[in-house]
Image (cartoon, rainbow, N blue to C red):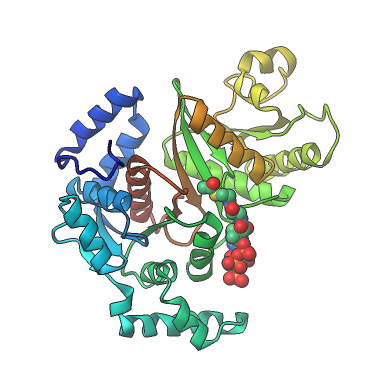
Amino acid sequence: AMESGVARKPITDWEAYEDELRERIGIDQKLMSRITIQAKKDVKTVVFAEADHYKILKAAQIVNEQRIANPILLGNRKRIQAIIDENNMDLQGVRIIDTYEEGEKRAEFAQILFERRQRKGLTLFDAQRLMRDRNYYGSMMLDTGEADALISGLTRDYSKTISPALQVIGVEEGINKVAGMYIILGKKEPYFFADTTVNVNPTADELVDIIGLTARTVRFFDTEPRVAMLSYSNFGSVGGDIPSKGAEAVRKAKQRYPELLIDGEMQANTALNRNLLREHYPFSELAERGANTLVFPTLASGNIAYKVLQEIGGVEVIGPVLMGMRKPVHILQLGSSIRDIVNIVAIAAVDAQNYNKQSI
Ligand code: ACO
């Protein structure tokens, strides 16, 4: 009912709303409630690049009312206002920015982008044209400090939405590749999957980067990572590119992150079933508790795995969490629910609080 376009009565108490959701879905949201409480302690400004959309406006209303974030709505003013009126939404006092009304700002942003990318084939004319795209404009708001985090991607293809952010915001210092993570709220504990959204066919060295980035992000969620590098083989049982790059990544990751509990390459059931590990692979570091963090060898495997779980696994998933950006940017998956969006906003807001400590 939430997404049918029919207005619901405004939710005025976040805890009550959480209880309602928990009842409906039957999942203990400990992980997210911690994040939500933290977000409220120092409220950050989050810009929505696709605000002329019912779900985004509804999520913006929720985060605004619950003081999880200060939303800024980027989009066609008339269209946004029409959706607000039609659905009796309360977004009083929330700033709407229509980039078409912002000629001066667009010119200023275009100049900055031009200076940054003039030696990468970008002309000033191109930069001016790009600033009409809200993903560029929103990224520039983040870059210049007019907002603390950027949320986009509800209606457009992931790769088209991430490109502007990569070009304007780019990666954090010391990080080679950004990557995407999903949290799977299992019955006993949360699981963390990566890379589910960005790198199509990472090399062994890129996997080492992804492992480091993912481990750091798992710790951001107050969980100690136990990482399995996945494959269709167990510890060299089958030859091939994927088993050998996985084994190489594990070898290198053990050297680079001596504190990290990691093993592989291994099959997914081996990683998750400690009885199987104990019986057949008792030498493995993961034999005691099994893995809670799964690193996939290719984007195809990671992306497909979480989507299958989401649709038929009866579990809740949170994400995608984009890791390694210089500032908090998160690209929603096509068709995310209002609940998905609120979750990502809370994560982005806490990420923004930690921005100087660079936690995601
Ligand atoms: N990490 C860090 N930087 C990167 C990465 C990365 N993983 N990939 C590209 N970049 C850099 C580029 O080198 C470039 O640098 P430059 O500004 O110095 O020139 C900059 O980011 C901009 O890149 P683009 O040219 O815009 O994009 P590129 O052609 O390199 O492609 C992309 C990057 C879009 C992420 C591509 O790898 C891709 O399409 N990945 C798959 C995305 C996808 O479809 N995911 C599945 C669906 S997601 C879901 O289901 C929710």
In the picture, residue 47 is in which quadrant?
bottom left
**Height in image: 37 above or below 89?**
above
Give left or right: position of 130 versus 23.
right
Specify whether 317 is left or right of 5. right
Q: Position of residue 254 (x, y in %)?
A: 68, 39
Image location (x, y in percent) of residue 91 = 17, 56
Which quarter of the rendered image does ligand 1 occupy?
Answer: bottom right
- Residue ranking furthest to the right: 239
Q: Is 222 on the left or on the right of 193, as rendered?
A: left
The residue depicted at 33 percent of the width and 43 percent of the height is 338
Left or right? Give the position of 284 relative to 316.
right
The residue closer to the viewer here, 334 or 278, is 334
Q: Is residue 176 in view from this perspective?
A: no
Q: Where does residue 195 sit, x and y in percent of width and height?
A: 59, 45
Q: Residue at x 43, y 66 (%)?
A: 135
User: Looking at the picture, how far across and down is residue 71, in whole percent?
Assistant: 26, 58
Residue 168, placed above or below residue 175: below
Residue positioned 53% across, 69% down in the render: 167
Residue at x 56%, y 55% (from the top left corner): 178
Question: How many numbered discs sit on the rendered protein?
Answer: 0
